[in-house]
Image (cartoon, helix red, strand yellow):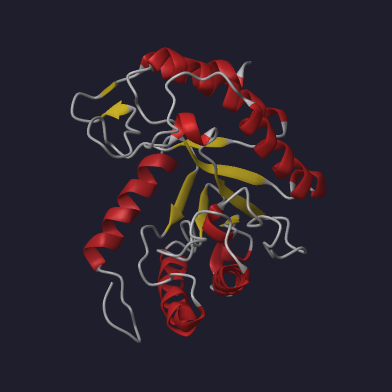
Amino acid sequence: FGEGPEYKIDDVWMKRVHEVVDYALNTGSFAILNIHHENWNYAFSENLESAKEILEALWKQIAAEFADYDEHLIFEGMNEPRKVGDAVEWTGGDQEGWDFVNELDNLFYKTVRSSGGNNSIRHLMLPPYAAGAYGGAPEHFIYPENDDKIIVSIHAYSPYSFCLDNGEGAVTKFEDASEIDGTMSALSQLFISKDVPVIMGEFGAVNRHNEDERAKWAETYVKSAKAIGVPCILWDNGVFEGEGERFAIIDRAQLKIAYPKLVTGLMNGLGD
């Protein structure tokens, strides 16, 4: 996007977003449209005013562009908003971070709801701090309580040692589901029991050349989430090899599923 105060989204980019959204909707599926990899909303108080200015400008444009789309298009305000580089970046946040994210979530909500068309009744996904399910992030999340089309956006790579850890604590075998059970129990208590829906907007387990174990994990994870009514979206970043986050599932060059056992595990978790 361009410079302020307009922060105009590039026309070619917006056209491409339209195209991809339509791919999904034309199959009868739902699409979630968000802004991602933001570098302007790091959750420090000195960034708040500029972040509010940018967020409002971007979502006014997006909401206007898709105002006539029906409920199959869901908007998600931010991706993992957090105090990047801080000691609490991934540990649940602190008061500064919670307040920052709550204020931006509220601004996103008000901006979309006042943007006309179907935006007044569109389902909206709002994340707590870092979209986290632990460390105080969901407990300090403030959301509109008089709107039944609000969905809590959570990302949970559980158990961390199996799913994401690249350090000494990393394991290749899935043997302990307690972290998954704890995550789902917390989400059920905080939100589901209050009739507030949750979507697991990201989950996954990095490839450690352990597809059989990942299939077991996937079945357990999805089954646990389904039990409390939480749909899950598998994170696929296109990365198959290297030292980073190897979350690829679909080989888009060859148009095939690279890990069919993993997909079978996911579907087994869903059951009938």
Q: Would residue 179 appear left or right of 81 to someone viewing this image?
A: right
Residue at 73% across, 37% down: 185
Q: Position of residue 31 (x, y in %)?
A: 46, 46
Above or below residue 222? Residue 127 is below
Q: How many marks?
A: 0
Specify the quadrant of the image occupied by residue 42.
Answer: bottom left
- Residue 202 shown left or right of residue 3 in the figure: right
- Give the quadrant of residue 59: bottom left
Instruction: Out of 189 and 9, give the one closest to the viewer.
Output: 189
Quadrant assignment for the N terminus? bottom left
Give the percent coordinates (x, y) of residue 118.
Answer: 57, 62
Residue 96 percent location from the top left of the image: 58, 73
Q: Please identify the residue farthest to the bottom as the structure is shown.
A: 5
Residue at image position (78%, 44%) is 189
How far across and down, in percent of the image, does residue 20 sit? 33, 47
Q: Nearer the viewer, residue 221 or 152?
A: 221
| Residue drawn 37% across the image and 46% down it | 22
Residue 150's place in the image compared with 206, above or below, is below
- In what quadrant of the picture does the C terminus appear? top right
- Which one is nearer the viewer's eye here, 94 or 42? 94
Residue 7 image-quadrant placement: bottom left
Task: Give the left or right position of residue 28, taking residue 197 as reference.
Answer: left
Determine the residue positioned at 38% across, 48% down.
21
